[in-house]
Image (cartoon, rainbow, N blue to C red):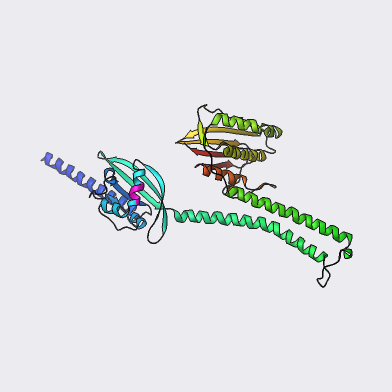
Amino acid sequence: MKVYDDFNLIIKKFERNKIEKEAQYSYFKYILEHVNLGIISIKKEDLFNEHSEAEIPFLNKAACDILQQPEHKYWHRLAKNTPWLVKELKKIANGGKILVDFEDEVESKQLSLEVIELQLLNTPYLIITFQDIRFEIEQKEIEAWHNVIKILAHEMLNSFTPVSSLASTIKSLTENKKGEILNLDELEKDDLEDINTAASTIKKRSEGLLVFVKDYRTISNVPVPQLTNINVKQFLNSIKSLMSPITEDAQVDLKILSIPPNISINADSKLIEQVLINLINNSIHALEGRKSPTIKIGCSIESEKTIIIINDNGMGIEEKIMNQIFIPFYTTKKNGSGIGLSLSKNILKKHGGNLLVNSEVGVYTSFSLVFKN
């Protein structure tokens, strides 16, 4: 009798555990069905067998909406309707992330597509996730253009307002009350001097505007990098030698930290040299009036990336302007052009990398040049 009761107890526990597992499964399935992230799960072998009539273990509503597909039960039907997706998935079948552009009947989309491989009961499965990020990218582009246009408008107004005013002054000095042009002998010496001063100011302001336009062209026309293998330690030591006269004159201690002799990057040495010179000059400016002004340049390797880091103990960058410093023509310097950081970031982007900043006001600023290995 006791054995019978024990078996009943075990059966009840199994049933309770089964109900709990089914409840958990339903709970998580409900969550995955209602997220905005497209999710598909398939056996890995089915990806390479588009005619397989295997069922799709999981396909949520967001995936169907993004792909503009019905809720297919079988993989070969979904594969047949989205051959471009199958093609891209095969590129990262062992895991990874890529961006994919595609168009449906309504609009164009840009997907962030990621594949994760996992083993379930000794069978390899692929968890495929994706989302349309075009809207977010377009919003960021619009915000960036608004900031650029705002700065362009500010600079041009600063130039055209005095030019317009001075042109009106010259016009009033060279004509009578009826608007008729005066003869040369009718002009007084003071009037001629005022006209000359006004013309000189207009010339100077016009030249400044031409320089501004030239700077704008510089930002938008970064040449295609000519990649070569660069030994980082040797390269940074050459930069230190190049900048020594300037750092010594500013009484700034420029240090190259310990770097393994075998670290290298594939980059355009002239363009990256331009970036480093610009960042060092910015650090020198930030170190004015600081105690023990120091610039440290180091290098590290992190998850298939090589990172060159420039750190100074200068005034730092306020959080409210951190997102603006890479905008063309934005500057906090009295005589700055506002193109240095924007140009530098563009150069790193052309290399397939990035330029990142981290700072604490009154403590330090650190710029990271990120290169993909």
**Residue 40 position (above or below residue 243):** below
Residue 284, by quadrant, is top right
Depth order, front residue of 200/297: 200
The rendered magenta stretch, by its main secondary structure, is classed as helix
Give the x, y percent position of residue 355: 54, 42
In the image, is 258 to the left or to the right of 212? left
Give the x, y percent position of residue 164: 73, 62
In the image, is 130 to the left or to the right of 9? right
Q: Which residue is drawn at the image coordinates 56% and 32% (left, top)?
A: 298
Is 87 included in the stretch rendered in magenta?
yes
Q: Which residue is drawn at the image coordinates 67% and 40% (left, top)?
A: 285
Which residue ends up furthest to the bottom in the rendered image?
178
Residue 340, by quadrant, is top right
Q: How many marks?
A: 0
Image quadrant containing the N terminus: top left
Give the x, y percent position of residue 273: 59, 37
**Residue 288 position (above or below residue 87):** above
Q: Which residue is drawn at the image coordinates 66% and 51% (left, top)?
A: 212
Q: In this rendering, does residue 330 appear at all? A: no
Residue 97, by quadrant, is top left
In the image, is 208 to the left or to the right of 19? right
Q: Which residue is drawn at the image coordinates 63% and 39% (left, top)?
A: 283
Depth order, front residue of 295/9: 295
Which residue ends up furthest to the top in the rendered image?
261
Give the x, y percent position of residue 7: 14, 41
Give, as a single range, the part of the protein colored magenta: 84-88
Which residue ends up furthest to the left in the rendered image?
1
**Residue 371 position (above or below residue 176):** above
Q: In this rendering, does residue 186 appear at all? A: yes
Is 106 included in the stretch rendered in magenta?
no
